[in-house]
Image (tube, rainbow, N blue to C red):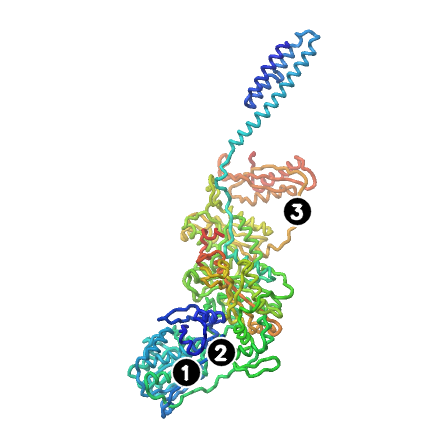
Amino acid sequence: MLVPVEWLREYVDFDLTPEELAERLTLSGLEVEEITEVEGQKVFSTYVTPNRPDQLSVVGVAREVSALLGAAFKPPKPGFSEGDTQASKLVTVDIESPVNCPRYSARVITETKVTQSPAWMQKKLMEAGMRPINNVVDATNYVLMELGQPLHAFDCDLVADHRIIVRQANPGEKITTIDGEERILDPEMLVIADPKHAVAIAGVMGGFDSEVSWSTKNVLLESAHFNRLSIRRTARALGMSTEASYRFERHVDPELTVFALDRAAELIQKTGGGTIAKGIVDNYPKKAKQVALSIRPKRASLVLGVEVTPEEVQDYLGRLGLEVLGRENGRIIVKAPTFRPDIEREEDLIEEVGRLYGYDRIPAKLPSGVTPQGKDSPEGAFASRISKILLSSGLQEVVTGSMTGPLGGEVAIRNPLSEDLSRLRRQLVLDLLSIICYNASRSIRDIGLFQIGRVFEPQDESIIIEKLSVGCALMGSIWDDGWNVDHAGLKSDFFLCKGIVQNLVDRLDISDLLFKPAEMETFHPTRAAVIEAGGDQIGVIGEVNSDLAEMLGLPDRVYAFELDFEALMEKSIGVKTYKPISRYPAVTRDLAVVVAEETPYRQVEELLAKGAGDLLESLSLFDVYAGPPLIMGRKSLAFSIVFRSHERTLRDEEVDERLGSIRSLLESELGATFRDT
Amino acid sequence: MVQALEDLRLEAEEKIAKATSSAELAQIETEYLGRKGRITELLRSIGKLPAEDRPSFGQKANEVRSRLTELVESRRGLIGSEEQELKLQKESLDVTLPGKFYRQGREHIMSKTSAQVKQIFIGQGYTVVEGPEVEEYQYNFEALNYPEDHPAMDAQMSFYVTDDLLLRTQTTALQGRVMEANEPPFRICTVGRCFRVDAVDATHSHTFHQVDCFVVDEGISMADLKGTLTQFSIEMFGPESKVRFRPDFFPFVEPGAEWAVSCFVCKGEGCSLCKTSGWLELGGAGMIHPNVLERFGIDSERYTGFAFGMGIERCAMLQYGIDDLRLFLENDLRFLRQF
């Protein structure tokens, strides 16, 4: 809100400069975001927190200044003389929706002249950011800014039968508002109507047909209190936000209506003459209750962490306009004014005491007593483990958003910002591919990425399954740069991708890892596998499908995997036991096995291990070859096999015997032959 | 014969002294001292001497052999070190050429900052807890004391998935879940992703990350809150950090505050980072509203608590002088490789 400093001075005395006052207000909760100058006058631009609608007026700010500085508060005192005719003889008011309109007060001014408002009023309105219109409308706006009570002025002669009915709108009812727009209303909305039609959208905007014009003589002034939810929903449904609706949806003091009417009537009479009809038509069936509550200075001291005395407490609350009713059993009993809807219980009073005492005077200390053992969440700790392993595998960590386009997931957002942010992602790999594209188009083509993040899928209409996932994608050389480096020979491939998974799983102490060929949408049909551990699927791996790669614009082959975080975590809980190291020497033998090309490596490896039995320490594949002199359809797998015993030095004959078993197993099971190595 | 031996000695000595490489020296050694060498050759013809002269000639010849052997050895040592020096010279490297290293991964700056923040609070005795990104309306708003459809929610425009499910707008949503399942005392920290309907620019995003901490115990005060945040700021931003509170409004705390740390660049003097105010605003804080505690059956007379939050991106932006929020989710490797 814009608060002209000179206007503020009319209601409270202070010696501070505008800058000093702004600092004081900001540090006690009313933030002055900016000080601007309008024709030599300083104007505060304030941010009013949603709980303090009482600060949405110049007088409200003056009350705060007076409380902060302990200076006298001088609200305006309307003074005028009334005519002989009773206002209630001129207009009638019926409230048909008392829940949405607890109070409707009206005054009538007759035989006034609509004119331009005086320069001093125009100047103040402009400083406060409002455009002068005529003396009647300006008076209502002036009071709005001064006191925070939204008012509306009708041309009384344009209100049929001079009768106001406050009711819900009829289905499809139309009204043209003063901005010239036609609005279609529904029964959720409250209107001010005459017996024929709606003349205003209550608390939001007046109607075009009944607005005050240069020829208006008789003015009906409305000053009402509306239910905040009703106004908020109406304004939102119509896509409107006005000075009036902004205040009503926060709270306007129900006790303020008459005072504001008096002030506006005084200003209209002063500027345009005329007669103010006697009395007020005040429809206020159920008076708002003032809440009595209490505060214990001891409790305030405990919560604030600093000693405040009962005298201080009483002084601060009094300055804020709270009525102190008395003291009893260490409690100070007060009544909260109706302009402070935020004061409901003791803590609210404690905050007021803290604000006036000064938050800056609260000391800093640490909680006393025993400090418990702090720890990361199990997921957080496990994610750190995974992250460390993947970082040491040379992968860059990335973080992408949870929202994605229609292809990326099934869980839809009802009110998305855009089509490409309309779903919650189902997997991470697609995000990684996008990042590769993004960077490739910036000339970075050797990339290895991983991410640990949440993925989402619907269980049913109302339950969304949300789980953590680990994704990785590789493209180009595994070396970023380096001179005389054979980048072509160091390119990422399926087996590097697989090696990263194997290393990860091994270091997480998960065993029985298995890669089973599988066809999946994202991947190359013959270069993909599901990953299992202990018989359960824990993820997928493969080369990115060329159609997808083309659609995304990937400049090179990309390999990727995605693992189920929770499955990894569940399988990783085992405790590892140390394996003793043999004191005896090893015997190493090489063996090149020739089998049919379609025989999976895994079968050969299994038979080798079976044949070697308990003397096998390790076996490693060092060459895979197909081509002459081998006959078509055969391939050679060359192994280095290490034998070792924990009990003795092995004799050559023992090892030869095992090699013999291996050979005959491979011969009988796979029809293998052997090459000399 | 004796004269011949003497000549041979002189000749060999001269050759040894003139030898320049170990190969030449080896050749000389073989020529004079080898099994078929010239000394052995002379000794073979010892029979030509009279019997009485033979022992003295033999002795003499052995003396010459050992003298020459000594000379060869000492010459070899000399030549060896020269040759070694030459060899090392030839192997010299340009140590200013760039080093080579296989690619290293780096943590994303968000993870790095989150970990740093978490570590500080773990050190202060906090337990880290995870909460869902798709949250129930009741935990995100209702349990946090938001009045029905209040303007306080305007700053927290939400993405909805169903009538009751939304993408959490604040990690504070976890408080209800923790209070529901646990008895005080507790010290909880959560770091996570939040969402608000907000267009993306240098300082706004629909997706951001927040840390939220809260403590519930007997006798917890606002002074404890200030001390905790001061301790955090010292660890995060440096030993001279101070914390400032300013009254602010969040429905789930009362009294409520916005907290700021003294600018670590200008030490409060005023600079471009703190926009000349001397203070860097970091987040919201306050004493947990008794309505929140009571909703979960916690005796608000016996227990009090504090809560505070801050943005992870904001922390990182301040620490590294990053001026564009979009960099965090864009994943430009030229950016990520700086951390």
* Residue A361: x %, y % from top left: 55, 69
Q: Amino acid at mark 1?
A: Ala
Please give the label number shown on residue A579. Answer: 3
Task: Nearest to the eye among marks 1 and 3: give it.
Answer: 1
Both labels 1 and 3 in a single chain: yes
Please give the label number shown on residue A260. Answer: 1
* Residue A546: x %, y % from top left: 43, 50
Q: Residues within 10 Å of mark 2 (few under 14, many from 20)?
A: many
Kind of element beneath mark 3 = loop
* Residue A97: x %, y % from top left: 43, 83
Asked whether A150 or A119 is in front, the reply is A119
Both labels 1 and 2 in a single chain: yes
Kind of element beneath mark 1 = helix
The answer to whether one can see residue A70 in this image is yes
Asked whether A33 or B45 is in front, the reply is A33
Decide: is A563 above or below B132. above
Q: CA distance from mark 2 to mark 3?
A: 73 Å
**Label 2, on which residue?**
A340
Q: CA distance from mark 1 to mark 3?
A: 88 Å
